Amino acid sequence: MADKIKKFFQKKKADAKFKLAGPGYKLNEEPPTRSNSDSGTSYNVTRRSVPSTESRQAAAAALARLGEQKQGPAIHTSLATIQAQVRRELEAEKKAAAEAAKQATPPPESTQLQGELSSPYLAVTGVYFRCPMIGPEILSKDEWNKKIREFLYEQLGEERGLTACLIIHTCNKNREKVNVCVETLCKYLENIIQNPGEEKYRKIRVSNRAFQDRVACLEGTNDFLIAAGFELKNLPFQEGEDDFWVYSEDNLESSDTLQVLYDAIQSAEPIGLELDRNLQVLLPSQAARQVDLPPAFFNLTAEELKKEQQMRTEMIERSMMLRTKAMREKEEQREMRKYKYALIRIRLPDGVLLQGTFSVYERLESVYKFLKENLINEEIPFVLTTPTGHRLCEEDMTKSLTDLRLVPATILTFSWDPSFSGENVAMCLKPEVMMLMQSM
């Protein structure tokens, strides 16, 4: 059933690419002729605006570093990385324009959080994600949740049963309630499969307390019952009438559908998101200025964030007390549990800093993988050192960023491994990555 779900998404992607290929024609017919407006060239050249002085300076610096190398690899800029960079720049421009408009009138208290997000001291503007199963876009979690929901509901007309299973697992965030719902739905189907002649198993009273608490309150359950063959009917009940989901006796001949849905609802998993690294390349002066973290990094609400200063004051007071090592470590762990994400900066030998966003539960090996993906030569051994002077080693690879106390933000210093006998490379990052360096 898991393979069927994968094929479902592969088919959707193939259909989307097919539509983008343009109109088709039969092999025994002549291909459609191009209009006069298309003759002469096979593509349209888009005029680009003249880059700013800051952009030209940043580009010149990158080209100068490239010129120092005797031989450089071909540049193959990642489309997704450029799209993410453009998106962040557009968001920064919008926020700057909004901030300029607010100067005329004092902002209300409800917009205070939005003002914080437009601060020039933010290290990142937010946390972004990818969803390979749906598309190549890089969006915030809220934007992805909306896009995934829209995508799933568009598929109901074509594949109601499988889509309903995905809606139940994806659009309902309380995993405990989802598990109870899946267990209840499977019990409904199992009773009919094992007891096809029992009429009581083919009726579900909508107002039943167990049905309301376990099934009806979750998104996608009505579509699942319809796909299984149930129909909503108003039937006599006690002294009046009530609504029932009724499985028709005529559907018993095609009861294989029940077994298929039984397997599908059990094997389906929520459509997951992958954390985008939000790759940035910073100069030392930029890294020193952009140090604040956005609210998305915290496991706190906006009101709780306002109390952060008060909590820090209390921490200073407690630090004056005599505490054991165990007490200090326990308090540090409690402090780090406030954060969902970690901002990791890696200072390279040329002073440039490579920045990425990680989950606090990711292992150190994810940081090494991120770094190697952006190095010119990932085969040359290197060492990362923490601000405390600890040289990260193989034993640390399986530890989480929280365990290594690299949360919520830290700077790791990159250096070539002393055991490497070759000449140190002057430029570490790939040229296409250096092109992402932010202008001053």
Image (cartoon, rainbow, N blue to C red):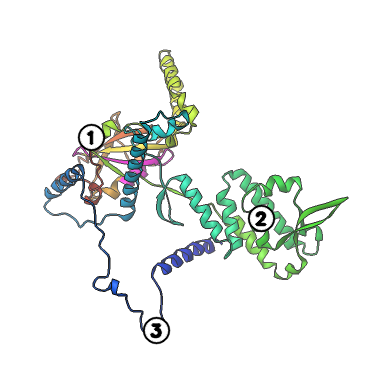
Quadrant of the snapshot with the N terminus: bottom right
Q: Nearer the viewer, mark 3 or mark 1?
A: 3
SS class, disc 2: helix
Q: Can you say whether 71 is above or below 100 in the image?
A: below
Span shown in magenta: 349-370
Tell me residue 262's x, y (percent).
65, 59
The question of residue 361 being in magenta is answered with yes
Q: Can you tell which quarter of the image residue 321 is in?
A: top left
Using the numbered discs, state the Cα–Cα distance from disc 1 to disc 2 in whole angstroms.
56 Å
| Residue in the picture at 20% in, 57% down | 74
Q: Which residue is mark 3?
A: 27
Residue type at numbered disc 1: Pro
Q: Which residue is mark 2?
A: 222
Using the numbered discs, state the Cα–Cα distance from disc 3 to disc 1 in whole angstroms.
61 Å
Position of 212 with respect to 175 (left or right) is: right
Q: For label 1, count other residues whose C-alpha is less than 10 Å away and answer few (under 14), some (14-19) or many (20+).
A: few
Kindly identify which numbered label has been placed on residue 284: 1
- Earlier sequence position, callout 1 versus callout 2: 2
Residue type at numbered disc 3: Leu
Tell me residue 102's x, y (percent).
38, 33
Tell me residue 423's x, y (percent).
14, 45
Tell me residue 343's x, y (percent).
36, 37
SS class, disc 1: helix
Using the numbered discs, state the Cα–Cα distance from disc 3 to disc 2 in whole angstroms.
45 Å
